[in-house]
Image (cartoon, grey):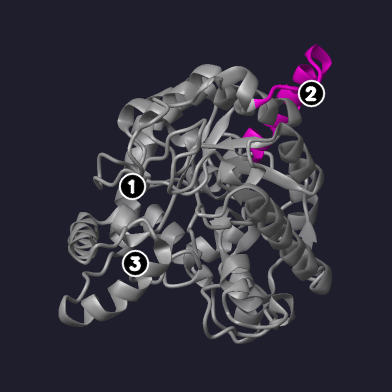
Amino acid sequence: MTTDAPAPDAPAPDAPAPDVGSPAAASPAAASLAAGGVSPSAGRALLDSYPVIDGHNDLAWALRESGSADPAGIDIAAHVEFTHTDLPRLFKGGVGAQFWSVYVPAELQGEAAVVTTIEQIDLVRQLVARYRGALELASTAADVKRIMADGRIASLLGAEGGHSIANSLGTLRAFYSLGVRYMTLTHNLNLPWADSATDEPAAGGLTAFGREVVREMQRLGMLVDLSHVAPATMSDALDTAEAPVIFSHSSALAICDHPRNVPDAILARLAANGGLCMITFVPAFVSQRCRDWDLELAAEMERRGLDHRDLASRQEVRRSWAAEHPPPRATLADVVAHAEHVRQVAGIDHIGVGGDYDGVGALPAGLEDVSCYPALIDALLDRGWSELDCSKLTCGNLLRVMQDAESAAVALQAARLPSAARIEDLDG
């Protein structure tokens, strides 16, 4: 959404701000605040120049699960009651770019996983086409800069789980051609070639074929996403990587003992790799109180003979069990603690944000939907983060990672052809 209003002044930090192109045009939300005589907060003002690039949002699956015959027909230009996400709230929250997850359940395998992922890609592309005044599909860092500078939301695609490619590097390349710009190596279950953080170890990390998947992703310029994977898989991927990796929606294990979080030893390796940990808002990942309650829920499911990794069963049991065992509430302060820890261990150049909105039922107090990013920036500024620090977290670091991945891909494509490897050849 283009505006003729002058762009807000850029922050004046004590070091150069990240190169994000021209500051983003004033958002509709900021314009509305000004028209109403209400001054935006310091965090909201910063986001007008350095919008959030969020690493993970599950709106596409939430729409698919809504029961609508045409999920892409649900009007996200108005408030959507059953989601955390719609266009008014994205603009209010200062979101300039979004990785839309094209998630499908890990229980889907083979053709079913591939077809359903393609349907999810199609759903996001339909939304982008329908709301082209507010959204535009982005494939490169340059696209993201241009679209944000135009006051619209750059839309990127992220595949959540290597089960989506059905052990086929040809399928991986096809997804890249459809716009997928990261793939999470696993979801909640192991793959034949990679161990998940929430399953029993089987491969010991990455197999030979798993390492070939990482190599081929980086040859393409597709970001390797290590959220959801086991620590051994994280380590093997970093050993194999020829370009930066990301965690699209993970927080710090040292602050909350959940296997979906990142150990300090891995956070410390991100600097050498050039990669990024994008802190998430999932209550059980950010609050130890919520994590402990979650373990009690898992134990209750086990008593009932159910698999706590089955998301549908988990949601059903949670609804009834929570009535007698009210869950604790995570807070904005919990999320800030993770941001500060990742900054301390990995460094300010290796942190981003991936809220996981519409991927969870509840969110921390103060971060209830995508309109709440200014509250996070305000909290970080109050903790002494500089405007430069915040601008790196919101968009500067991820843009740099994308640019580095794109540059590495140019060199890797000059050095080697597309991989013809098959899992049966490499793993037996």
Which three-letter amino acid code belongs to the residue tagged 2?
Answer: Pro
Provide the major secondary structure of the magenta segment.
Answer: helix
Q: Which quadrant would residue 309 be assigned to in this image?
A: bottom left
Which three-letter amino acid code belongs to the residue tagged 1?
Answer: His
Residue 142 location (% of width, % of height): 79, 42
* Residue density around tag 2, few if under 14, some if 14–19, many if 20 or more, within 10 Å: some
* Residue density around tag 3, few if under 14, some if 14–19, many if 20 or more, within 10 Å: some
User: Any magenta on residue 19?
Assistant: no
| Nearer-the-camera pick, 353 or 235 | 235
Which residue position holds label 2?
418
Up the image or down, 101 lies above or below 239; here it is: below
Residue at the image position 81 percent from the left and 18 percent from the top: 417
Up the image or down, 396 lies above or below 357; here it is: above
Residue at the image position 42 percent from the left and 68 percent from the top: 312
Q: Which element is circle 2 on?
A: loop
Residue 338: numbered disc? 1
Residue 314: numbered disc? 3
The quarter of the rendered structure image containing the C terminus is: top right
